[in-house]
Image (spheres, grey):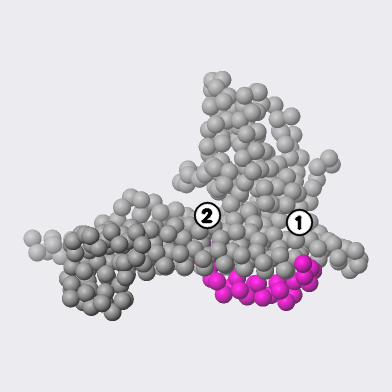
Amino acid sequence: MNGYPEAVAKISNDYLERVKLQLRLVPAREQDEFLREIQSHIHEAYHQACLQTTGDDDVARMLAVLRNLGEPAEVVSDRLPRAMVRSGTKRSLPLYILAGITIALFGIPLGFGGVGVLVGLLAALAGLLVAYYAVAGSFLLVGASFMALGLIRVVLPELWDKLVMLGFIQFNGPVEIVNHLSPTGQAFLMIVVASVFVASGVGLLRLGKYLLRGLRFLMSLIFDWARRFAQTVRRKMRRDKGEGLPATPRIVRTQGT
Amino acid sequence: MEYSDEDRDRRVTQLRKGILELAVMGVLYREKHYGYSLVRALTETGSISLKEGTIYPILARLDRDGLVRSEWVESDQGPPRKYYALTSSGRQLFDELSKELDLLISLVQRKWKGREQNAYAGKKLAVRKG
């Protein structure tokens, strides 16, 4: 029991739920402990506010307490798995490769099946990335070629004729309609097509930044999960073999004394 | 080139972020505190306004680095409180960091005093000229 009026208790619980949501990747014990700490903070701050302010607007008081405490994401920032905290920052690719090799070589506790799944996932992600940038690159290349041809058509018509004569430029199928256009019309059409391709290519490259960020985040999460899984398995194995007791918790609970 | 208010605020925040961790250690150096009382201790002089939640990431960092230890203590005023205290390595680090801070402060103030003296000298010169 926290002794809050019903509406106030609901606001406080909503806030704690939001904190809990932010902590979803944190181990349950740590999550529970931090929630209790924040609950205690809210309780202290709220009762202090009750003593300092007059009036009976409990809801406003609680809202002020939570505003002072800050957004749940800020409050939990240093308790999240490293992957989530660092997702927006730059990291070097060689480190990932090194981590991948290390896991492949020493990931025995993880099991070779696990390593296989991990390598497969990473390869799929890398393939997706390469395919994406290949499409963006080909769009830019096609755009640049069309642009060059359009300019040749207008500025150097004799070179254009020579290229057509040598068979480097051919109009086949539905594109034959272009033959009925004036040289300036053909050039204009090619420049328009070129602009569309270039714009699409540039757009894809810009979007790629987000794709990269997302993939980085995904890879960090995969590594994080793999690390945690390996740690858990290793700890279990050690416990089974009786090679030592689990680390002494730093927190001394004096509840119920 | 003029700096913007936003630019100044960003730098002030950066400066505070570094110092705040040391300030938290300083408060815990004197006595143990729980989260809320730590915020009160930091803000009691009124010289700094603080989003209360910002101390929890700091405490988490200090705890992870073994610079503070914590314990839950029953409270007769409500839920149990989690008290934090500096460990011996935390105290040692605080001593070293505060020496470093003193050096930095003296460096900044020396520059300041130098500027003030220059400005004063300029004024004296102007009076003589007059």
* Stretch in magenta: A89-113
Question: Residue type at mark 1?
Answer: Arg
Real-space CA distance between mark 2 and mark 1, rounded to the nearest whole angstrom: 24 Å
Please say whether residue A72 is visible from this viewpoint: yes
Is A193 on the left-hand or right-hand side of A205? Answer: left
Residue drawn at the location 77% of the way across and 67% of the way down? A113
> Under tag 2, what secondary structure?
helix
Vertical side of B29 occupied by B73: above or below: above
Q: Is residue A15 left or right of residue A157?
A: right
Percent across and percent down for residue A111 are: 79, 68
Q: Residue at x 62, y 46 (%)?
A: A22
Is the residue marked by circle 1 packed among few (<14), some (14-19), or many (20+) residues within 10 Å? few
Specify the quadrant of the image occupied by residue B87. Answer: bottom right
Give the x, y percent position of residue A172.
34, 65
Identity of the amino acid at label 2?
Leu
Residue B94 percent coordinates (x, y): 59, 63
What kind of secondary structure does the magenta stretch mostly adopt? helix
Q: Which residue is mark 1?
A: A250
- Whether residues under marks 2 and 1 lie with C-beta atoms below 8 angstroms apart, the answer is no
